[in-house]
Amino acid sequence: MDSNTDIVRDPNVKTILQVLPAMSVGGVERGTVEVAQALVRSGWRSIVASAGGQFVRELEKCGAEHIELPLQTKSPLAIRRNSHALAEIISDEKISLVHARSRAPAWSAHAAAQKANVPFVTTFHGYYGTGVFGLKKIWNRIMSKGRPVIAISEFIADHIIAEYHTDPKDVVLIHRGVDLSMFDPAAVTPARMIKLASEWRLPDDGLVVMLPGRLSRWKGQSLLISAIAELAKAGELPENLRCLMVAPQPARSSYRRSLDAKVRTLGLEGCVQIIDNCRDIAAAYMVTDVVVSGSTRPEAFGRVVAEAQAMGRPVVAPAFGGAPEILLPAVTGWLYTPSDPVSLAQSIARAIALTRDQRDELKRMAREHVAKNFTVEQMTDATLAVYDSVLNGAYPVSARNND
């Protein structure tokens, strides 16, 4: 979008600027679009600044605006240039509030917001490592400068308070949300399910265990392969079980090759299948009997855990990070000891042993649980309420700038 100072803007319309590295596929990007959509629906003006990406189309479709800046860069000189550019945008576009969603853009946005004397809000989307001797905390700390700081889980809220000594009253918990219109079992047609089952050569009477997510070492694909091997070793691996690693796009070939080699070494070629270009994740959930979150480091929230429950599927997830907040242990899913293939195998065995009646009851309770606690509407309503409270003086700008 090109800034045009000749356009007359209604001074009563509040304008929110969200900043993030890029608008490629991911949870941060999806959340940015969801908030932008809610802002436009509510009569606000929504602007997003980023390096661009495929989600820009989603912004423009809903009536939000996008300004392209190289906000993904970590170069000190580029961060400074971005700060000047954002300060001009804040002035030209009459920005009411700046919301930063990632560290590099936050450094630029914080300086720009201070210069313009407008409120600055952040969202902690991740559990940032502190590095050797805690040196990365200096880089991470910018995310604690928001007033308030939005935490996407209780786990992250506790982390912010403990690690960055943020006053608890300056931390607001807003869980990420699931779009229940997209993740709705009733909305997935049989044709979509048949198409996937055919493409993936799934047997009609098969049991399917799926780990959705990009192919990345910390996402736990290797751990799940080890757990399947443990089931085989214990004589508890059903002959009709298929284990799917489903990613939205292809991964680095070296990691993909390492997974293929592990499958061959363990003799699991007929059981484990890697699918690295799935474009219909809702249908993928529907052809699945058990969903696994295999993360080997704590996830800030755990969108897979919420999505799978929305689709009525039992979930197996690690007992750390945000996952324990999202599922109901032994009711809608099971928690296993993180990075322990034996514990993961035991949890999978419990899930695949459910009877049809037990599955029906779990489906009902899981979807109700997500609908009550983790919807997009709840997330966006709470975010706009934060914007309102800030603009109404709940977090004075002068106090923030004296941090």
Image (cartoon, rainbow, N blue to C red):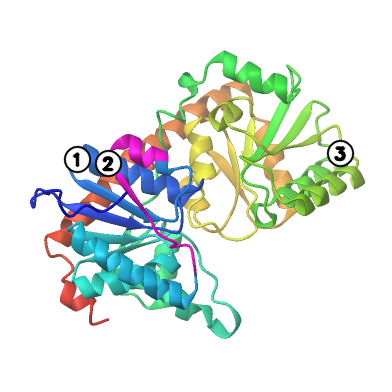
**Residue shown at the point (41%, 44%) measured from the top left:** 56
Are the residues at dot 2 and dot 3 in contact (C-beta closer than 8 Å)?
no
Bounds of the magenta segment: 57-73
The reply to whether residue 11 is visible in this rendering is yes
Tell me the CA gap for discs 1 and 3. Answer: 52 Å
Q: Compare marks 2 and 3 and give the one earlier in the sequence.
A: 2
Judging depth in this view, the residue of 225 and 352 nearest the camera is: 225
Position of 401 relative to 124 (above/below)? below
Please state which of the two labelled residues, at mark 1 or mark 3, is closer to the viewer.
Answer: 1
Position of 119 relative to 177 (above/below)? below
Q: Compare marks 1 and 3 and give the one earlier in the sequence.
A: 1
Q: Amino acid at mark 3?
A: Leu
Q: Amino acid at mark 1?
A: Ser
Q: Secondary structure at mark 1?
A: loop
Residue 261 lies, in percent from the top left, at 87, 48
**Residue shown at the point (76%, 31%) measured from the top left:** 242
Q: In the rendered image, which residue does mark 1 sit on?
A: 42
Q: Quadrant of the C terminus?
A: bottom left
Q: In the rendered image, which residue does mark 2 sit on?
A: 38
Tell me the CA gap for discs 2 and 3. Answer: 46 Å
Q: In the rendered image, which residue does mark 3 sit on?
A: 268
Are the residues at dot 1 and dot 2 in contact (C-beta closer than 8 Å)?
yes
